[in-house]
Image (tube, rainbow, N blue to C red):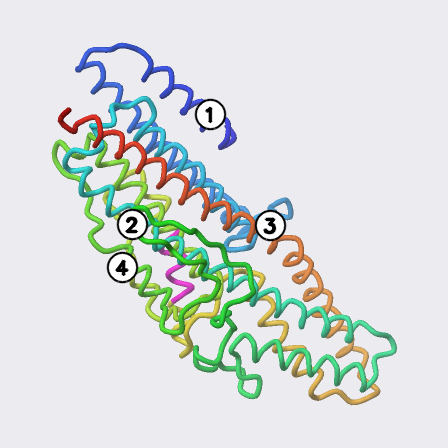
Amino acid sequence: MPATEYQGSFLSRISIRRNQVVSMDGNHEQELEELEIFQKNISERFSDLISDDSSSSSNSASSSEPFLSIAWVRKLLDVFLCCEAEFKAVLIMGRDPSLISKPPLDRLIPELFDRAVKALDICNAVMHGIDSVRQCQKLAEIAAASLEQRPLGEGQARRAKKALAGLLSAMGIDETSGGHKSAERSWSFGRRGGGGGGVSVTKDRGSGQSRASTWGVPKNWSAAKQIQVMSANLVAPRGAEASGLAMPVYIMSIVTVFVMWALVAAIPCQEKTGLATHFQVPRQLGWAQSMVWLHEKIGEELKKKEKKGASPVGLLEEIQKMEKLGQSLLEFSDGFQYPVPEEKLDEAAAQVADLTETCRRMEDGLVPLQHQIREVFHRIVRSRTEVLDVLDHAGKSSAPSV
């Protein structure tokens, strides 16, 4: 069943049940059933992401969502939006507001809000990272267009070489050695503000302070440290709390941190050193098994990059292809001498075609991906505001009348 269908079925069931008058025992049984369905939906959605990877690893021509491709990341964000909608329904739909202002939720919900605010900062950083990828895409397109010319002369080769050198430099790759430069020299994250695709929120109700429009990423900001802080104090509920509302709050916290961690891993972000070890998915919980598998696979790729002596640029499949093809074609352009042997020209033509296809996928997918990240940003803001409104209502209802 498609995600939107079983999400709609789940939300409808909650709405109907919450409008029924039931006994206290019946209400507890209902909550247990809702929690079980919520966990089942979480497991199935992340399992679908593994299925996409399995089909791509078998070289299936029908697979349109290879692991860590732009399409796969977009599906991951769809999963997050569905999980978030169901979580909010479980937490507040038709429920007595006083229930979510009592222990342990009086502690867990503020912690969830704090993670939500940090997730907004990551969304901003990822938006800037995508802007950087789009700039590199333009350089790759210039190089590909130059090398497609026939007959291919030294002028086209020089133009391609200049574009490819700029591309690899922008990606933080030392084109002379094939290695990576330090993270400080790689990618541009719009630190001075003024442009780019960042999104903003103007009011932070949790602290009573206004949040300025955050168009730039502060120079000392670290994506890896942000994930590390978000994952702190993530402890699974025990005893009676494991069958109450504390569990969906914990589940949504894990989902939020994992999705943000995967985004940072896939997209160029400022300072990602140590990202592979800064967050762990709980292995002992049944609903998290698919997430554990995905976490391990992404973590392995991060560690491979870090072993090469560089902070990982971005695991996005299209970025990896662009890097590999860019290095090979730069070598071809740098050693270009007319006339080029036919075999060497054919090999370069195949790589140019591959680079052109990679650029096309970026052109088709990066802007929709930015729109989707913006949607995630505003959904987090809106949901946080809605829960705060419920808590405000609970506070007013419990206040003694004068």
Contact? badges 2 and 3 (CB < 8 Å): no
Marks 2 and 3, Cα distance to the nearest angstrom? 33 Å
- x then y, percent, for residue 321: 59, 66
> In which quadrant will I find the C terminus?
top left
> Of all residues shown, which one is farthest toward the right?
151
Q: Please tell me whether mark 3 sits on a helix, a strand or a loop.
A: helix
> Which of the numbered marks, if any, corresponds to residue 229?
4
> Which of the numbered marks, if any, corresponds to residue 368?
3
Contact? badges 4 and 1 (CB < 8 Å): no
- In the rendered structure, which amino acid carries the disc numbered 3? Pro
Residue at which label 2 appears: 208
Q: Within the image, what quadrant is residue 212 found in?
A: bottom left
Labels 4 and 2: the sequence-earlier one: 2
Q: Please tell me whether mark 4 sits on a helix, a strand or a loop.
A: helix
Could you classify mark 2 by the number of other residues whose Cα lies within 10 Å: few (under 14), some (14-19), or many (20 or more)? Answer: few
> Which of the numbered marks, if any, corresponds to residue 8?
1
Labels 3 and 1: the sequence-earlier one: 1
Q: Which residues are magenta?
A: 294-302
- In the rendered structure, which amino acid carries the disc numbered 1? Gly
Labels 2 and 3: the sequence-earlier one: 2
Marks 3 and 1, Cα distance to the nearest angstrom? 24 Å
Count of marks placed on residues: 4
Residue 89 within the segment the image draws in magenta: no
Q: Nearer the viewer, mark 2 or mark 1?
A: 2
Marks 3 and 4, Cα distance to the nearest angstrom? 29 Å
Q: Nearer the viewer, mark 2 or mark 3?
A: 2
- In the rendered structure, which amino acid carries the disc numbered 4? Val
